[in-house]
Image: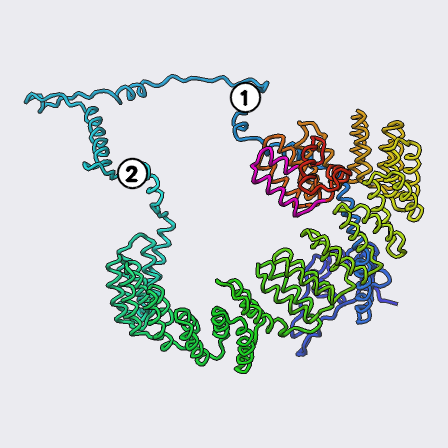
Amino acid sequence: MSQRKPILPPGVKIDFNALKPPPGYVAGVGRGAAGFTTRSDIGPSMPAPDMPVESTTVDPADDSKFDTFMGNDTGVFAGGKMDAEDKEADQIWQAIDQRMDERRRERREAKVAEGLEKFRKENPKISEQFSDLKRQLGQVAAEAWESIPDIGDYTAKKRRMEQFVPVPDNVLANAADRNATVSALDASASAVGGATTDLTAIGEGRNTVVQLKLDRISDSVSGQTVVDPKGYLTDLKSVTLKSDAEISDIKKARLLLKSVINTNPKHAPGWIAAARLEEVAGKIQDARDMAMKGCELCPGSEDIWLEAARLQTVENSKAVLARGVAALPNSVNIWMQAAQLEKDDAAKKRVMLRALERIPHSVRLWKAVVEISDEDDARILLSRAVECCPQHVELWLALAKLETYKNAQKILNRARQAIPTSADVWITASKLEESQGHESAPFKIIPRAIKSLTSHGVVIDREWWMKAAESAEKSDPPMTATCRAIVSQVVGHDIEEEDRKRTWIADAEECVKNGSIETARAIYSHALEAFPTKKGIWRRAATMEKEHGKKDVMFDILERGVQHCPQAEVLWLMAAKEKWVSGDVQAARSILEEAFLRNPDSEDIWLAAFKVEFESGEIERARIILAKAREHPEASSERVWLKSAILERFAGDTTAQRDILQQGIRKYPTAWKLHIMLGQMEEAAGNKDAARSAYSVGVKECPHSIPIWVALARFEEHHTSVPKARAILEKARLINPKHEELWLHAYRTEIRNGNAQAADSLMARALQECPKSGILWAEYLLCAPRTSRKSRSIDALKRCHDDPYVIAAVAKFFWHDRKIDKARTWLNRAIALNSDIGDFWAALYKFECQYGTEESAQHVIDKCTAADPHHGEQWQSIAKKPENKAATSTDILKRVAEHLDDHAHV
């Protein structure tokens, strides 16, 4: 039980300072004061380190440590520590997240791109909405832009009234006094009777005097113009005006170069730079002085002498170079510069000969002096040059060219001994022998050259030797024997055996492109010796001879080719065709007869024999050949039956033609050409039901053949009704979607029958289904009104910028607008894109006949004959007529040009 404190009497106060404080009491702690501890309180020991105090209380509302993955870590894991396993787990989970993100990236990016594209389509920019209008602004001429009136101020706002302020009197007085006559008489002048002085007249007189002086100096007394009025402004333009910045830069550079020169006065580039700086600054005399000072301090530098000579006049330059030669007698550049300053060749030669006395081993000086010497002097000089410079091949070769045959042989032998590693000496020796008519000598010299060079360690560079062969062929006169000898020795050098054929063909084609026909011929000859059974090499060699060589050489190659490759049908056909084209029909027959013996089952040979007889007018012989071909099981093909029907149609035997077509259809039911020919024959004979039956059977048997659908639709349009034709074309489009020809014929059907609105609707659908169809865009352009041609042309060129039909349609617009050069350019461009379309050739020929010359029209005919076109609507419709069977390409070209109208696809 605790003892009670005694109760003090009234008026007596407790002395708290004398009382013992309670344990843990710190004075002032209640009002924020902190206690302190002294060394005397704790003794001599060090204080214990402060340890982190772990809080045992948890505040559930503390969100400062919130984590998006773990949540609020003040919960269960608030007191946990991060160890190595936790870090490893975090890394694993992070790798998994990255992997999942990579897998979804492509799909996410594609979705974002699709959304962005959709947004741009739905919300186009203002510039995109007005792009077509902005495009038309590019055609506005400058005069039209200038003629646009300025817009006035038509706003409804109240205009501000203009206010006028009276001019002060002093301004008016000054203006009046400006041109007034000043008449003043001072006291001294009045005393002696002085006159009035007119200062204004004095000013006007001064201007008159200056003008007279300018007029006087413009022309001298002799009439020669001193001041060029026309070139005066041009001369002013040539004056270099230095800005403050440039002047400052020049001053800085001058100080820098001055420091360089003072630091190292023997440094010649510093003097050259300083002289050129003064030259740029316009102080030419300072530049000359600087250069001459550099010559004095750096006499051993040829650059400073050349720079000093350049800055001086011609006469002073000679003196400077004379001093330079004295200082540097072995400098070739100084001697050459001194020679160039001389005006005549004799003086130049004299300077160079003096230089050669000092520098006899300079090839540059020898070449220069030989160039300005005549032939006799050049021979003497070169004889001395090869003694002084025996290792330079050019000097030996130049001397050999000037000598006779015997002396040239001796010189080349000496050159070969002096320079045993030079191939040029051997090639020159080969050309020398060939020039003397020794055709077999190159085939002995070149192998010796290869052997000698190899023994001396020279690497045989195949590319260099092939270029040397081409150079020998192109020399004047051509050295063909040397060319063939080089090719025979090096064409197979350093090439793998499996790469020989491909490499040789590529080399030959490259030589043909370069115009080196003899080199290509030698390569093909070597290749045929290595691969005699390769028909591709024989065909390429024959084609090259046909285009660039001689016919007898081509016939020889084909004759040897069919002997080595008897099963190569293409070689037999080429030989027979070339004989037939040259007019030797009997030789063509003989070749085909031999080809029959070697290839009895070849369809191409049977048809070639038929063509020879048919084109020669031998109808019975052609009929017999085709009959035998139809009876031959291996040769009885669809083409043979078709050619048989064409023959009977030309002969006019309708019954035989019908029998052949019906038999051919039974044997080849999917041959759509046979069905069309049968329908056309019945239609021409007036048998409408039979024609409709033939077309209908063809449609059933060949549902994917577009021409037969078109033929049936045209038949129904002419003989039944337009709706029936429209239905047939619609059915054809369902079976063959996205086919441009069906849309084209449907559009033309509506145009022919006057349904312009339906035609426009069809064309819109057609361009949506076939946006890249050039023939549809061309039809769309040709039927466009004049006001919309330009916009439609731009749209068509954007879709089909390289389509020949679109290019030809745009060319026709230029033609109608009388833009001759553009029309010619675009027609040629269409032909370059597709030269097999005869309609384009006919359009160009008609254009040249109308706006060109006879030579340009004949040039078109020659190019068309070489191209030999076979396609085109107008071209085929005329070329396939029986009366045009014997017509040449020139005849068909002229007939198509005559029938060409505004609706033709050109």
Query: In the rendering, at what x and y percent does residue 254 appear?
Result: 33, 58
Numbered disc 2: secondary structure? loop
Q: Is residue 768 visible?
A: yes
Q: Quadrant of residue 338?
A: bottom left
Viewer-nearest of labels 2 and 1? Answer: 2
**859 in magenta:** yes
Badge 1 local density, few (<14 within 10 Å), some, or many (20+)?
A: few
Where is the C terminus found, in terms of image quarters?
Answer: top right
Answer with left or right where residue 621 lies relative to residue 860.
Answer: right
Query: In the rendering, at what x and y percent does residue 65 appear?
Result: 78, 58
Mark 2–mark 1 distance (CA, rounded to whole Å): 47 Å
Query: In the rendering, at what x and y percent does residue 104 appear?
Result: 81, 55
Badge 2 local density, few (<14 within 10 Å), some, or many (20+)?
A: few
Q: In the image, which disc is placed on residue 228? A: 2
**821 in magenta:** no
Q: In the image, which disc is placed on residue 708? A: none
Going by the picture, which residue comes out furthest to the bottom? 455
Going by the picture, which residue comes out furthest to the left? 192
Where is the N terminus found, in terms of image quarters?
Answer: bottom right
| Residue drawn where x is 84% and y is 50% of the image | 624
Residue 354 vertical position relative to residue 179 in the rendered view, above or below:
below
Residue nearest the viewer, comparing 144 with 657: 657
Looking at the rendering, the stretch of residues picked out in magenta corresponds to 843-869
Numbered disc 1: secondary structure? loop
Q: Amino acid at mark 1?
A: Gly
Answer with left or right where residue 108 lies relative to residue 545.
Answer: right
Q: Is residue 120 visible?
A: no
Residue nearest the viewer, comparing 168 with 40: 168
Q: Amino acid at mark 2?
A: Asp
The residue identified by callout 1 is 152
